[in-house]
Structure formats: structure tokens, C-alpha cells
Amino acid sequence: MDKLISIIIPAINEAKHLAKLIPYLKENAGPHLAEIILVDGGSKDASIDIAESAGAVVINSPLRRRSVQMNLAAKNATGDILYFLHADTFPPPQYAFDIVTYFEQGFPVGCYRFKFDSDKWYLRINNYMTRFDYPWCRGGDQSLYVDKAIFNEFGGYREDYIIMEEYDFMEKVREKYPFKIMPDDILVSARKYEMNGYWKVQWANFTAFRKYRSGKSQQEIFDTYHRMLKHRM
């Protein structure tokens, strides 16, 4: 029997993207979809209404923190595979087939490469780098699928993490299980670069990653990153 996928989307005020993303995911899932779960962190826009109208399961998180939101959704998921997806990203149309195929080939955890929804030449550099298997080439924008049993084995995401929770989780899981970078691209919004400028975002990403690797506190990493960039809320 084919494995079923629970798609988990943590979001705050993403009505514009959810209106397109959820129908797209349902249309292209084939027989592999268990459910789409929107786990909302306190949206003030129409995110919840749009998700419910599109057929997603909506869970309201008591805390506006991505790690907490994703863990809460995972506890309520019924699928064999959890697929964590940002609201402003679009996986390729065959995403469900890819995930099940590589899962059954012995890769219980994996992600896509990415490309930005922009033709700026300098963003193509970032796109290209995500095909390489280095920690600094990974990130939550690339989405992440994982065997639900393995997710539970590691206790999910650390809920005391307020930033870079995906890096921590992937590092732990990859020490024990094979990891697959699927050879296709997820489409990622370039809005952060459009708001802040390319080099500013690159420097903020580098600074946050350096602080994370050197063991700085979550609060210091979070405060530094958000001080350096403007963020759409």
C-alpha cells in the first residue's frame, strides 16, 4: 500500500499565498495525500477561512513559534510521511510522487533544491548552491519530508528554538538516517530579498549561521537576524 503524506504548513498572515498553494497541493497529490494541515500562529488576515474553504485542516497554535506550530500539527497528522512546507513556496507538480518514490528507495528524510521566483542573476547563484550537500546550503524554504516514526523518535523540533529549528533537526536525523536532496526545484518567494536587498540578506544569513554554529543563544541569533532585516508579518 502506498504511503500517505501529511502536508504541514506553519503560517501567520499568509492568505495571499494559501489561496493558491492549497488547491495546487491537492490537485497534484494524486493518491498520496492524507491531509493538508495549516497550523496557524495567530493570523489577522483571512488565512484560516481560506485554508478551511480549500479543504485544509486548520489547527490554532497557542504559541506563535514555528517549532511549536509544526510539532502540534505533527501530533495531529494521520499520514506515514510528514511534509513540512512554507506557505510562500511551491513544490514541483510531481512532489507527492517524488517523496513516496525516494522514501521507498530507502531515504526516510529529504528536501528539494530551490529556485527563487525571480530572474535576477545573483539569486541564481543561491539556486545553484542548493544542489550541494553542505549544511549552509540547506534551509526550511527547501521543504522537508520525514518518516513520521523518525520524527517522533527525535522528539520533533526543539520547542525552545525560535530560529533555525530545521537546521538542528536535520543535523540530528542525518547522523542516523540517509538524507536525499531531490533533483528538482521548489519555487521560493524572493520577497525577503526584494524588501532588503541581496547583500543585506546574505550577510544576515551568514551572521545567523555563524552564531548558530558557535553555540550562541537562540535569543541572540533571533535578535541579531531580525535587527538586520525587515520582515513582512
Image (cartoon, grey):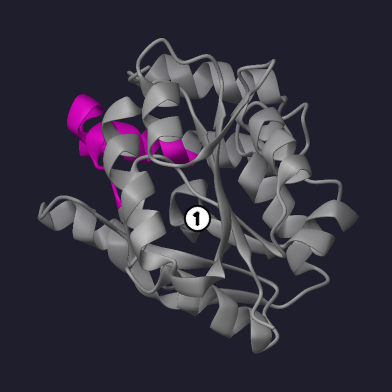
One can see residue 133 in this view: no
**Magenta region includes residue 200:** yes
Q: Which residue is mark 1?
A: 143
Q: Quadrant of the C terminus?
A: top left
Nearer to me, 209 or 159: 159
Place of residue 198 in the rendered image (x, y in percent of width and height, measured from the top left): 23, 39
Q: Is residue 64 above or below residue 148?
A: above
Give me the residue at 58% from left, 78% from top.
100
Give me the residue at 14% from left, 50% from top.
118
Q: Amino acid type of disc 1?
A: Ser
Left or right placement of residue 158 versus residue 209 in this view: right
Mark 1 crowd level (few <14, some 14–19, many ≥20, 10 Å Cα): many
Place of residue 212 in the rendered image (x, y in percent of width and height, measured from the top left): 65, 38
Left or right placement of residue 187 versus residue 135 in this view: left
Tell me where residue 65 sits by quadrant.
top right
Prevalent SS, magenta region: helix
Tell me where residue 205 sits by quadrant.
top left
The magenta region covers 188-206
**Magenta region includes residue 217:** no
Place of residue 232 in the rendered image (x, y in percent of width and height, measured from the top left): 33, 20
Tell me where residue 187 sits by quadrant.
bottom left
Place of residue 150 in the rendered image (x, y in percent of width and height, measured from the top left): 82, 62
Q: Is residue 93 above or below residue 121?
A: below
One can see residue 122 in this view: yes
